[in-house]
Amino acid sequence: MKINHSAIALLILLLASPVAMSEQTQEEFLAGFIAGKYHLLGKYLNSEKTYFGKIDLIATEKGIEVQRFIEGNKISGTAAIEKATVDKIDVLRMRFTENNIKYEETCMIDGDLDNYARITCYLYQPGVKTTNPGLEVLFIDHSVN
């Protein structure tokens, strides 16, 4: 009987992959998936005024760093993959302070047709009710990624 060493190696690799992948949490996978530079299109909180900018999501050992670049201003913040609703849906939650006002965003993470992250967000002030939340959508910036 002739042994196909390539087939055996492939079988071992396929069997070992789920074990290796199971060591990475869903949160770690999503943090790596969303890391990158994005175009940002938004609508201000409690307004109909829109804006355009850039945002960098940087996965680090300490979590996700956020760098927002809007209308010549750089705003730094943090983010984390968290659970939302009773269904415990994974969301990206970003937090930052601008002009001494604390903001938070809850974002759905999806994929685009090229398998890059597409992120859509509600922008609000934590603990403050509004019927007109801010909105943001993030599209991967292909010129730098």
Image (cartoon, rainbow, N blue to C red):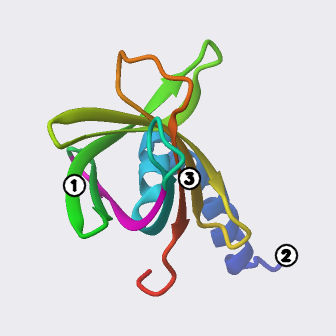
**Residue placed at 75% from the left, 79% from the top?**
4
Magenta-colored stretch includes residue 62: no
Q: CA distance from mark 2 to mark 1?
A: 66 Å
Q: Is residue 8 above or below residue 48?
A: below
Q: Is residue 86 above or below residue 16?
A: above
Of tags 3 and 2, the one toward the viewer is 3
Task: Compare marks 1 and 3 and give the one earlier in the sequence.
Answer: 1
Quick one: 115 or 29, which is closer to the camera?
Answer: 115
Residue type marked 3: Ile
**Residue placed at 17% from the left, 43% from the top?**
99
**Residue placed at 52% from the left, 70% from the top?**
140
Which segment is the magenta one?
50-61
Of tags 2 and 1, the one toward the viewer is 1
Label 3 sits on residue: 119
Quadrant showing the N terminus:
bottom right
Percent of width and height locating residue 3? 76, 76
Q: Secondary structure at mark 3?
A: strand
Label 2 sits on residue: 1
Residue type marked 1: Ile
Task: Compare marks 3 and 2 and give the one earlier in the sequence.
Answer: 2
Quick one: 49 or 105, which is closer to the camera?
Answer: 49
Q: CA distance from mark 1 to mark 3?
A: 18 Å
Task: Compare marks 2 and 1 and give the one earlier in the sequence.
Answer: 2
CB contact under 8 Å: marks 1 and 3: no
Residue lying furthest right in this view?
Answer: 1
Residue lying furthest front in this view?
Answer: 48
Of tags 1 and 3, the one toward the viewer is 1
Q: Which mark is residue 75?
A: 1
**Residue placed at 20% from the left, 52% from the top?**
76
Report whether residue 8 is seen.
yes
